[in-house]
Amino acid sequence: MVRVAVVGYGYWGPNLARNFVQADGADLVTVCDWQVDRLSAARLAYPWIQVTADYADVVADSAIDVVAIATPAATHYELAMFALRAGKHVLVEKPMALSGADAQNMAEEAERHERVLMVDHTFVYTSAVRKLRELVIDGSLGKLYCYDSVRVNLGLFQHDVNVLWDLAVHDVAIMDYVLGVQPIGVSAVGIAHITGQHEDLVYLTLFFEGGLLGHAHVSWLSPVKLRRTFLCGSQRMVLYDDLELSDPIKVYDRGVVVGSCDKNRHESLVHYRLGDMWAPRLDRTEALRSEIEHLLACIEDGEEPVSGPDAGARVVLVLEAAAQSMEKQGKLVKL
Amino acid sequence: MVRVAVVGYGYWGPNLARNFVQADGADLVTVCDWQVDRLSAARLAYPWIQVTADYADVVADSAIDVVAIATPAATHYELAMFALRAGKHVLVEKPMALSGADAQNMAEEAERHERVLMVDHTFVYTSAVRKLRELVIDGSLGKLYCYDSVRVNLGLFQHDVNVLWDLAVHDVAIMDYVLGVQPIGVSAVGIAHITGQHEDLVYLTLFFEGGLLGHAHVSWLSPVKLRRTFLCGSQRMVLYDDLELSDPIKVYDRGVVVGSCDKNRHESLVHYRLGDMWAPRLDRTEALRSEIEHLLACIEDGEEPVSGPDAGARVVLVLEAAAQSMEKQGKLVKL
Amino acid sequence: MVRVAVVGYGYWGPNLARNFVQADGADLVTVCDWQVDRLSAARLAYPWIQVTADYADVVADSAIDVVAIATPAATHYELAMFALRAGKHVLVEKPMALSGADAQNMAEEAERHERVLMVDHTFVYTSAVRKLRELVIDGSLGKLYCYDSVRVNLGLFQHDVNVLWDLAVHDVAIMDYVLGVQPIGVSAVGIAHITGQHEDLVYLTLFFEGGLLGHAHVSWLSPVKLRRTFLCGSQRMVLYDDLELSDPIKVYDRGVVVGSCDKNRHESLVHYRLGDMWAPRLDRTEALRSEIEHLLACIEDGEEPVSGPDAGARVVLVLEAAAQSMEKQGKLVKL
Amino acid sequence: MVRVAVVGYGYWGPNLARNFVQADGADLVTVCDWQVDRLSAARLAYPWIQVTADYADVVADSAIDVVAIATPAATHYELAMFALRAGKHVLVEKPMALSGADAQNMAEEAERHERVLMVDHTFVYTSAVRKLRELVIDGSLGKLYCYDSVRVNLGLFQHDVNVLWDLAVHDVAIMDYVLGVQPIGVSAVGIAHITGQHEDLVYLTLFFEGGLLGHAHVSWLSPVKLRRTFLCGSQRMVLYDDLELSDPIKVYDRGVVVGSCDKNRHESLVHYRLGDMWAPRLDRTEALRSEIEHLLACIEDGEEPVSGPDAGARVVLVLEAAAQSMEKQGKLVKL
């Protein structure tokens, strides 16, 4: 039985707690948060657990195998390092850290202590994103042309990070998992519209070898919530709408074909091809559930984490570069 | 009666011709195109008109008051200058020209001959875009935060210009008309995925004073056609979906408010406000019809063209800067 | 060359005229309407044609092979009979007639004179409805369970017929073509909300052997326009949204399966099956164009009309029965 | 403190339990179900409660004030009567009973013992349905023309009742609450497509005085889930889409107007009016939460239940009549 402590019981922590409680092979033993009202909430939900406001208790408790960290991003590094040094396995909220150097240290610390360090890139455990990866790997899409994502809604403004680290992190993690190639350059522009606040609107562009372009429009300033990702290849195109209950993924057998030159017509050379559309059935397992089952398998059977320290660090490096580019109004930052 | 020649009878020319035929106060007298089959098509539709493959005939014909140019972009400058010098009024397809210098010359030439030079920025004559401008001017939106547009579909690839000059030109023209301020910088990234073709995917960013950001995602590589524009202000937000038959414009009485600091909650300082949504009724007059009525009023009553040489030149200058930025992978180009 | 007269140049007539003009093998020679302004409109569009306000001219003109009747429903019978007796082929607007007896006479008259009599059931010539029929015939849907249609919009109120004869006629014609079986009973309820007007809202139910149920909700009183048809079978289900530009037809590999009895669970015996969704690519030929090509083939090559007098009469009989049921507030009328 | 027992812990019971736990002024003390695994589930969630498989324990427990019944419909009558006789207040799942006579008895029993009997017509406690009622009462819609509802999805098949009692009950309850008038007749047709099962598809029509028509299309055989209600009046029209997260209610300032007779035009007399569309902001309180707060207010402050025994009985009477009509293939049953 893997014994778990959930640290941070704000927005995301309760989801972690619930899934650990439901998972076979895991025991939720402790919830840690510095706010008393949250601890009472945890107790109301799971009366048998211990609660503490002191993170040191968690780290010191030899009965705890895994520390699941769902605190503000700025605290991830210290809390994770502390737990790793104490020989705990760690599941840390995205982003893994706020700098590539920190991410690197965390990766090394985990290796040194031979502990599992997993980053909670929840989306890569959804059946939809897994399907995207599958379509890329099996060549259904052909040569990849672009990844375009719109991830916008109204608020909530984070007080510790901007919308890049809050929302774009999802797209960077998804691209890292789905595209299977690393970006060679990053460009980002963003604006903070509310005085004294972080950027609430960011356009992020990732450059890859061979003309593949990745783009994410993330914002806290949209009247409607949108979660639309579009993946375009030479053979097929995919729309992934995370808010569509039935059939979130639509595969379009459409594309452009280079035809014979016909200078007489306004549209020359290139014509397009229209085929069927297909929406594969997806299983509905909660992503977090699959992720936690995977975490347990990594701990007990030595599986390799899909969203391990390397993936986590790659994502942080991209975001770090994006932050630099943003300060220079979109200047390309090479990776 | 204003006598009109339509030059170029490919994709757009027939729309111009039809609207001139239907307009009170205008006579379609000539259609000019270098392709014989198009001339026959014109004749079949309007048996009473003259047709010619020689543009010189049009310019030489003293019975013609207005030359409406719907030819490939690269030819706009020469054809328009030729007509203006001959004392014709000119309606020219967007983009007005392919360089700011050319656009400038055209503007001066029109002034020199005291002729009306209008650029066919069709969208600024739609009731939807007029409503957007109205909402900006009357302050309904409050301080402007961002303009975001997605204008994508599958093909048609143009053989003379890239998607920037083909599609983004619409957004630049709309921003020029609606926002009422000029950009101070431009950044654009784009890719040509089909060998030997122009860019088929472009992300364009316009920087304005005071943190207003404009962005357009234009592409010929989308499996579905999208025409969505989002205008966000401090007081209200607007979604404009040009493909939605009923209620293309939705005004959301939503926004963010700066609340009292509450360090205990994950979302700090800023909260959001949800109010009603409202879709104003729009009249359904065809934009081109309104535009042509306006053209006639400019010619006969000396009205100032809404999309005159200045607007046309401003749009070209932005696109020119965008093209430069695109060559430098998104480097900011100051205006 | 088949020479055609279009009779009635109001809402639908111009579409007929345009398609006859564009069709190979047909000549539009005459347009007939009792309203002078419509005749001028026809002339403006097709200056070479003859126009007349006197239907007798059309019937008397030996140069005319086909009379295409697009007049109010109440006039179809007399106009068609007059033309058939004069040896013309006839294309008549839906509904073919307002009584089964009239429809029967028309059928016999056409047979007597060995002339083609085709009813303009436009929808059965759309690629979407053809695909529906295909899916039924090839067994993809399994045993048919139900046909459900919503065909509503705001106005236009017809002054000669109610919404049953104006809109439900489409669904009855589509069912006649797609389901391949005849209803054994009809029930309909309807209301006229505007004093002195015809029913503007009707719910029509068709009963078939073996538990197949057909239903159409037709109305002139909807704020939004809907054209949604749902066809459900034991193996698959189809949604057909005629207003969806891309992918109007979606085939769902879903259904219910009878499982082992499990009295302990609230849902017993029956479980459901979720599979992929698939949207076949449809060609975009205008339905009326295909229909007119088919008409010409019937006249010249003796093809059997898909929407011939029998289909037309069957549709009228169902509507007639529905009208009777409506008078009795939905009492079942056997066929 | 009101002490509550939840009886039946299948699909709906846990929602009742959760809301009672969260409600101020209520204590969840007991959960009763004849299935052991459900009792353990209840215990896992609320370790402090008592659980029992014997309903008699609940009724006998003087520490229990309210019995909330979420068992199969067929058991509602006996369980409720038993509790009422024992002096308990009762919240009973919809439908209140399966016959008007039973409903009547329950109402009388509640009155006799001066106990609150509330039927769980959850929808009438949603902010959306409350808004519909408000729009009717304040005259915004003008004279009511029709209520049309589509409530379809795939399964779950109920083993104890057909889709009429499972889904149409919602629409009958909503109409009862919103329209403020009682139907004078009912007609229904339905089919059981799965051998040995109940009707899975039903079309229900309610006739009201003055030409108001109510209609509900309910089905367990739709590939997609739809929850669309349309309310049409002489002044305005409303669409209520219960699945639309933002703006479920849209009010259309549209309608038909009787114009001057114009025999020359195909559409005569009646024209339509297009105005703005408006989506009022709705609060997001969970309906069940409001309902339970209301229940407590009825018990403690003697408020009149919105969904009391009379409303519950009216709904059952309509469904009973619908069931009779269904046996006669839609024959009108007067009320």
Image: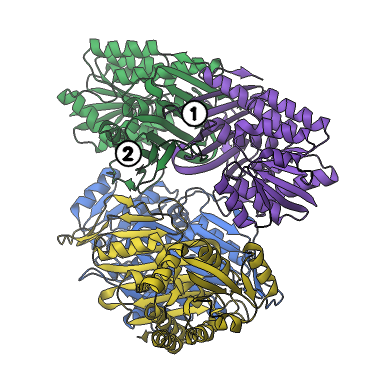
Chain colours: A green, B purple, C yellow, D blue
Q: Is residue B30 left or right of residue A275?
A: right
Q: Is residue C91 left or right of residue D8?
A: right
Report if residue B43 is visible in the image. Answer: yes
Give the amino acid at mark 1.
His
Query: Residue D271: x, y in percent?
Result: 65, 69
Is A117 in front, or is A283? A283
- Disc ID at residue C198: none
- Disc ID at residue B198: 1
Nearer the observer, disc 2 or disc 1?
1
**Do the residues marked 2 and 1 share a common chain?**
no
Q: Residue C4, relative to residue A93: is it above or below? A: below
Considering the numbered disc 2 on the image, is that residue within a helix, a strand or a loop?
helix
Chain for disc number 1 = B
Query: Residue B27: x, y in percent?
Result: 74, 53
Q: From mark 2 to mark 1, how far is it between C-alphas? A: 33 Å
| Residue indicated by mark 2 | A128
Give the amino acid at mark 2.
Ala
Query: Residue D274: x, y in percent?
Result: 64, 61
Q: Is residue D268 left or right of residue D32?
A: right
Q: Quadrant of residue B240?
A: top right
Q: Are marks 2 and 1 in contact (CB under 8 Å)?
A: no
Residue at image position (67%, 30%) is: B77
